[in-house]
Image (cartoon, helix red, strand yellow):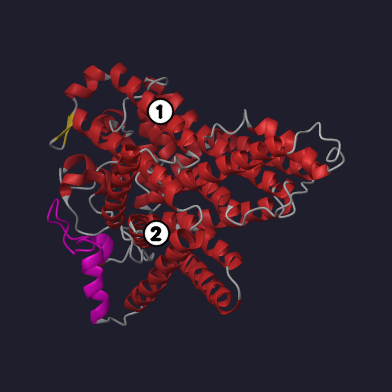
Amino acid sequence: MLTKLIAFLFAMAVIAIPFDAIPGVKAFGELAHESSFYLFAIAIGLYNLKVAGAILAGDFDAQVGGRFIWLTGTAIVVVIAISAIWNAIDISTATFHNRDGFPKLINSATVIVYGLTLALLTRAIVPGRWYTCLALPICVSASLCVGFGILEAFDRAGVSLPLYHALNSMLHAGSDLAVQSWDGSTNLKLIEVWDKRLRTVSFEPPAFGNFSGLAWPWLLAAIFMTKGVRRAVHICLLIAFTVLIVAAQARTGWLLLATDIAVFGLARFVFLPPHGRVRRSAALIINSGVVFASIALVIVYVARFDEIVRSTVSGSSVSDISRLAYQVTAGRMFAMNPISGAGLGQFAFKASSYMPEWGYFSPEIKASLQYPEAPWPNTYSLYARLAAELGVVGLVGWIAIWVTLMVSVRRAGLVYSHLGRTVPEVAYPIIMNCAGVLVAAVTTDTFRTPMIWITLGVGACLSARAQQLAGGLVQARPFSDPTVRDDRRYIIGVALAHRLRGAFWCG
């Protein structure tokens, strides 16, 4: 009964993920406005009680996948601790907008610990309930976004509905007020309609874009998980949600949608076909091309950086100036302390010292650095934040986590196929989400996105389960058995089992 309640709360929390701007309890800091946090927190508490009771009763059965999460969490905590110790003096004396460095460090670390706990809960609850606890709730959430997006689009077109305004004020915690609370001035962004993008139920368009990009793979997976009328409904929802992403005009949403489509096509037809027979030559060529293109893109960006700065500063987009200025600030902070960074959560305390002069052309930056109640300065990119706050170790480590998980899930899919099964449909959205986390880090800078940690949980579990199955096969059918020596699938399965034992990092 308790397990069903936890699963229900988890599903409800997944539905609530895009509702990230509600009036919340300020004591919870960065998580205060996340409606999903409160439901996830209750589910985590109940699950811990269940585990504690099982341990006391002597019948605790650990779920697979925990080892990868524990190792990942330990590595993250160690990096944060080393960076904090290295910068202890600066952190203890840092002050900005009535906030101190050490409490900010604790608050940011708490968000990550919460995320790792959510990953552990996910790997215990979702497997076996892929559709009811993850795919279906995301579909419900996407439906709500589509419905509210239609009302929002009507309002932008001049068809104002009382229902929309009531819901808007309730869901967005006053973020659309005509007068800015921090300086009492008119919110020109609202009055002059600078920002015509749709945000639906989320705090702002980039937040919706981030959610939509991570949710889209599971809407696609729901189609493959169902049949008949239900599948037709899921197809219609996927089309409607895709139209909403495009119409919302959030660049983050467009970028992640393109990533989802590209990664699904590559995984399904090249790197992880359902039958498991990978065309090695094609996979090698495409993989090399992707790596080369990524490196070339970075080189071109660095070579043309001065030109990019000039064109951005002379342009009319306030958001672009703010984004580039804060990322340049993060780069300067990284250059001063490239190994350990300035410490987790410390970017804002040093932002004014490293801000380029042209950054003050943005009224958003002026407000964030001058008024205590203005939006907290941020890097607009998780890579920039990791580099500035945790140095090269944190930056490379974060990338390594998701590349490792992506490779592990792909290998897990191959194990299933070589054991006489088809590749699990859930492998594709997990791989797409891993790629999405890496791409989203270019335009968003927060650790509090629940889909990040849900992806970590389901990916670790699927990988560990495949390793478990492969290990069981080796024990059940020894390779020396002459009756199976000619079984090609078995031979491949045994070889993969031996390789996986040292490659998964999962228990």
Provide residue 116's location: percent of width, then percent of height: 38, 39
Give the quadrant of residue 354.
top left
Residue 339 percent location from the top left of the image? 42, 19
Residue at screen point 13% across, 51% down: 183
For this view, does 424 lie left or right of residue 482? left
Label 2 element class? helix
Which residue is tagged 1?
Answer: 74
Calculate the distance from the C-alpha at mark 2 to the C-alpha at mark 1: 31 Å
Judging depth in this view, the residue of 99 and 500 nearest the camera is 500
Magenta stretch bounds? 162-190
Mark 2 closeness class: few <14, some 14–19, many ≥20 residues within 10 Å: many
Mark 2 vs 1, N-terminal side:
1
Amino acid marked by disc 2: Phe
Depth order, front residue of 495/144: 495
Judge whether 77 appears above or below 492 on screen.
above
Q: Is residue 498 above or below residue 172?
A: above
Instruction: Please tell me which residue is depicted at 30% across the width and 43% down the height of the picture.
Output: 53
Residue at image coords 61%, 65%: 224
Reading the image, the residue beneath label 2 is 208
Q: Is residue 30 magenta?
A: no
